[in-house]
Amino acid sequence: MKERKAFLMRIDPALWAELEAWAQDELRSVNGQVEMILKQAVAKRRSASSPRAPEDDQGSSAGKAG
């Protein structure tokens, strides 16, 4: 099993209760739920910041007078 980094986190009790209920709905521990949420957020950030392919000039000039 991969080594895991442990850290202390302070969290609002109301947020903890929401995370705990969400985790129970998905049959996870709160720790597992938080890790899953963070992984999804990192993946979304990576995909949003990845370089995009340039637009196809032929498609964008259709219908324009040349």
Image: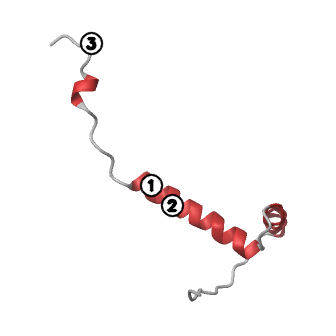
Label 3 Cα crowd, 10 Å radius (few <14 / some 14-19 / many 20+)? few
The residue lying furthest to the front in this view is 1
Question: Left or right of 23: which side holds 8?
Answer: left
Give how far apart the Cα atoms at labels 3 and 1 are.
32 Å
C-beta proximity under 8 Å, tags 1 and 2: yes
Q: Say which residue label 2 marks.
A: 43
Q: Kindly state the secondary structure of the residue where label 1 is placed.
A: helix
Residue in view at x 64 percent, y 64 percent: 37
Instruction: Check the picture and name the quadrant holding the N terminus.
Output: bottom right
Q: Say which residue label 1 marks.
A: 47
Label 1 Cα crowd, 10 Å radius (few <14 / some 14-19 / many 20+)? few
Residue in view at x 76 percent, y 72 percent: 30
The image position of residue 44, as x and y in percent, is 51, 56
Tell me the amino acid under the disc marked 3: Gly
**Front one among 14 and 31:** 31
Give how far apart the Cα atoms at labels 2 and 3 are.
38 Å
The image position of residue 35, as x and y in percent, is 64, 71
Give how far apart the Cα atoms at labels 1 and 2 are.
6 Å
